[in-house]
Image (cartoon, helix red, strand yellow):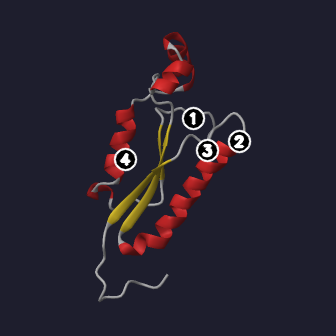
Amino acid sequence: MPPTSPSLPLKSGAIVSISGNLEPEVVNAAMVAKAGLVVWSKGLSEQIGQHGITVNCIQPGLIGTAQIRRLYPDDERRKFAEREIALRDFGEPEDVANAVTFLASPRARYITGIVLTVDGGMRRYLF
């Protein structure tokens, strides 16, 4: 893209999208949609960065929501977390909100095109 014209002032802004874990047990439409959001975020960051706008994506892990609590009752949650999550517990909605707040803030002005996992270290693969 051409450089910004000196007569046009730079603006600023932040776009933060929330995807999901890309380490599914099966490939399905939801995984494809999540991957698409990641690619869109990375591509858009390149296209609009010249305008001072950052674009980032957050991938939450298992967050203690009503749906997750139904899927992982107390004892199952504890066992799963001890086995699969480095920090040994599920996250809370505030953990994701804190990441969004940071990426949308002026403190993250030089961070763009990233995928930030907020998953307590729940990584099954080395990539």
Q: Amino acid at mark 2?
A: Asn
From the image, state whether disc 2 or disc 3 is nearer to you: 2
Quarter of the image that includes the C terminus: top right
Q: Residues within 10 Å of mark 4 (few under 14, many from 20)?
A: many
Residue labelled with disc 4: 100
From the image, state whether disc 4 or disc 2 is nearer to you: 2
Question: Do tag 1 and tag 2 residues touch (Cβ < 8 Å)?
Answer: no
Instruction: Name the residue located 31 percent from the left edge and 84 percent from the top edge.
Output: 8
Instruction: Name the residue located 50 percent from the left edge and 30 percent from the top edge.
Output: 62
How many tags in the picture?
4
Between discs 1 and 2, the one toward the N terminus: 2
Q: Residues within 10 Å of mark 2 (few under 14, many from 20)?
A: few
Residue labelled with disc 1: 123
Q: Amino acid at mark 3?
A: Phe
Residue labelled with disc 2: 28
Q: Nearer the viewer, residue 12 or 82?
A: 12
From the image, state whether disc 1 or disc 4 is nearer to you: 4
Label 3 residue SS: loop
Label 4 residue SS: helix
Q: Relative to 88, is 76 on the left or the right?
A: right
- Where residue 80 appears, x then y in whole percent? 56, 19
Q: Relative to 25, is 109 on the left or the right?
A: left
Q: Nearer the viewer, residue 69 or 2?
A: 69
Between discs 3 and 4, the one toward the N terminus: 4
Instruction: Name the residue located 40 percent from the left edge and 39 percent from the top edge.
Output: 96
Instruction: Name the residue located 28 percent from the left edge and 81 percent from the top edge.
Output: 9
Q: Find residue 127 and name its label.
A: 3
Gap between marks 3 and 4 measured at Cα: 23 Å
From the image, state whether disc 1 or disc 2 is nearer to you: 2
